[in-house]
Image: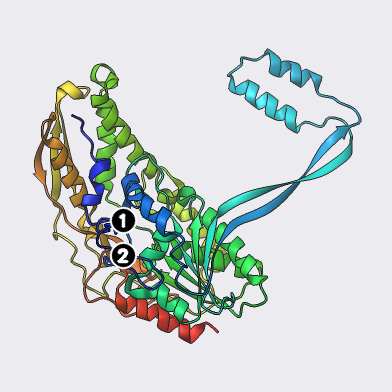
């Protein structure tokens, strides 16, 4: 038996994954032969099994995306070509003493590393021959789905959302998955039929943070700006993608970089940060620190749960998590840094902009009005250092209960603990949950309903919705906005 707070094999039992309902015997496809997204929520929590469960679908259907219409599916690498100068011939070599110093130091010493780095940078006399060499920075992939006329003239760039991996395997994010996720209510299909060219921008690494991925989006937009057939470009950012798009567009305007963007749409993006329960993060860190690293820790019984926990904790330390999460374990410095940079560049792009939020206008109820203990469990001495330890997870009402697009992380933690308690030295006394605001309405609006930089806020939902729920009314709002503002 093993204790695993987030067991890989069972994550899809939760409602976070849109792929749980897909089966070979009951697949409904649209005219582009892409499965309709019946569950209209793009998942936040994902696991390697989510990827594996659709790997065969991806392999067999990646070509079917474009098989039934006259357009084409092109895959563009989003890369920036860089150049540097280096000396290939010196007239007078010097710095022998530094080389001797480096050789005399311990093989693994920091001092030796620093000495060798200094040697590499040190003047070697006069350079008599230079050469230019080139290298590429890879930012991701753009999947281009042209409309039926086959001409790339009205692109709509859709920027990837953030998804949190609950195991140590990177989750592949294919064009097939991305297209399917935004095709709820036929959004992607309708845009193509209306003459738009849908371009899906997928990051090379979703964990690289806001600024790095915004640089990638800028590279893509600069490329589109060089294509003469394009009349204008629209940018739609999903969740994190909305922040990435805002940063890229603001930076391009600030630096005077030419672009042909006519409008910007942000869908439930955490412009002011997102709320991931601090109590869950703190208890996971404490739990990992108590797992026996001797005795039982030398067996799979303890090694497996420790590895699972460390994989989760590693996600908490990624640049993207630190950029987006208000109570990130590293503090607020990373989030405040990109927000300060954005403010210095003008804070917001000047093009017409539309905000969509999963949070209601003023319906604040997400859970209990007072602090609630959602999980109470004990880990017993045979498996953990220092004897039995009790862990308790509490809600934070002033953050959890504000209006906004919600997640149910508390319930996820409780469900996983109950599932793993049978037959293990783990006793669960309390196991419940509640929804918690993840992207508040104010955060999605980069301000508040009465003070937002967006040109327009689409109609608020009557009650709070799960984060990244793309309803038919939201899909209609996006299509209507494009018709008004993309020329």
Q: Position of residue 409 (x, y in %)?
A: 24, 52
Quadrant in which residue 6 is drawn: top left
- Left or right of 202, for residue 97: right
Quadrant in which residue 251 is drawn: bottom right
Numbered label tally: 2
Q: Residue at x 62, y 72 (%)?
A: 259
- Left or right of 312, for residue 322: right
In primary-sequence order, the first of circles 1 and 2 is: 1
Q: Residue at x 59, y 19 (%)?
A: 109
Q: Residue at x 44, y 71 (%)?
A: 68
Q: Secondary structure at mark 1?
A: loop
Q: Nearer the viewer, residue 80 or 349?
A: 80
* Mark 1 and mark 2: Cα distance apart in space: 8 Å
Q: Position of residue 286 (x, y in %)?
A: 26, 34
Q: In the rendered image, which residue does mark 2 sit on? A: 440
Q: Is residue 392 above or below residue 483?
A: above
Q: Position of residue 269 (x, y in %)?
A: 39, 65
Q: Nearer the viewer, residue 285 or 470?
A: 470
Residue 387: tell me if it is visible.
Answer: no
Q: Secondary structure at mark 2?
A: strand
Instruction: Tell me the crowding category of disc 2: few under 14, some 14 to 19, or many 20 or more residues within 10 angstroms, Cα based.
Output: many
The answer to whether mark 1 and mark 2 are in CB contact below 8 A is yes
- In the rendered image, the quadrant that contains the C terminus is bottom right
- In the rendered image, the quadrant that contains the N terminus is top left
Instruction: Tell me the crowding category of disc 1: few under 14, some 14 to 19, or many 20 or more residues within 10 angstroms, Cα based.
Output: many
Q: In the rendered image, which residue does mark 1 sit on? A: 275
Q: Residue at x 15, y 44 (%)?
A: 375
Residue 177: tell me if it is visible.
Answer: yes
Q: Nearer the viewer, residue 480 or 404?
A: 480
């Amino acid at each position: 038996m093993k204790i695993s707070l987030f067991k890989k094999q069972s994550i899809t039992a939760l409602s976070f994954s849109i792929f749980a309902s897909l089966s070979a015997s009951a697949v409904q496809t649209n005219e582009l032969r892409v499965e309709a997204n019946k569950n209209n929520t793009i998942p936040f929590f994902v696991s390697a099994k989510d990827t594996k469960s659709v790997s065969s679908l991806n392999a067999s259907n990646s070509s079917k995306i474009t098989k039934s219409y006259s357009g084409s599916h092109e895959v563009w690498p989003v890369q920036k070509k860089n150049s540097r100068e280096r000396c290939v011939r010196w007239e007078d070599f010097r710095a022998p003493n530094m080389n001797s110093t480096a050789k005399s130091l311990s093989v693994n010493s920091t001092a030796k590393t620093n000495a060798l780095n200094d040697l590499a940078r040190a003047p070697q006399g006069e350079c008599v021959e230079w050469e230019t060499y080139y290298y590429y920075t890879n930012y991701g992939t753009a999947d281009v789905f042209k409309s039926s006329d086959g001409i790339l003239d009205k692109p709509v760039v859709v920027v990837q959302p953030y998804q949190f991996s609950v195991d140590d395997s990177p989750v592949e994010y294919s064009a097939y998955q991305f297209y399917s996720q935004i095709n709820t209510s036929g959004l992607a299909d309708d845009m193509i039929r209306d003459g738009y060219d849908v371009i899906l921008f997928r990051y090379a690494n979703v964990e690289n943070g806001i600024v790095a991925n915004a640089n990638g989006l800028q590279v893509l937009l600069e490329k589109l700006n060089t294509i003469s057939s394009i009349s204008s470009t629209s940018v739609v950012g999903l969740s994190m993608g909305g922040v990435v798009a805002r940063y890229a567009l603001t930076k391009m305007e600030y630096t005077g970089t030419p672009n042909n963007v006519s409008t910007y749409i942000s869908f439930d993006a955490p412009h002011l940060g997102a709320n991931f329960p601090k109590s869950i993060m703190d208890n996971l860190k404490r739990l990992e620190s108590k797992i026996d690293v001797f005795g039982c820790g030398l067996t799979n019984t303890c090694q497996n749960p420790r590895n699972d926990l460390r994989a989760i904790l590693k996600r908490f330390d990624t640049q993207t998590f630190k950029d987006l999460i208000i109570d990130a374990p590293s503090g607020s410095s990373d989030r405040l840094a990109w927000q300060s940079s954005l403010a210095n560049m003008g804070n917001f792009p000047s093009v017409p902009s539309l905000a969509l939020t999963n949070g209601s206008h003023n319906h604040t109820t997400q859970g209990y009005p007072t602090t609630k203990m959602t999980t109470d469990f004990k880990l017993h001495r045979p498996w953990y250092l220092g004897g039995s330890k009790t862990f308790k997870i509490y809600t934070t009402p002033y953050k959890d209960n504000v209006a906004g697009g919600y997640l149910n992380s508390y319930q996820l933690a409780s469900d996983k603990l109950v599932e793993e308690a049978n037959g293990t030295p783990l006793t669960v006394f309390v196991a419940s949950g509640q929804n918690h605001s993840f992207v508040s309405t104010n955060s999605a609006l980069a301000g508040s309903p009465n003070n937002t930089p967006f040109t327009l806020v689409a109609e608020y939902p009557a009650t709070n919705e799960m984060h990244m729920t793309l309803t038919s009314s939201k899909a209609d709002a996006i299509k209507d906005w494009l018709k008004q503002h993309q020329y």
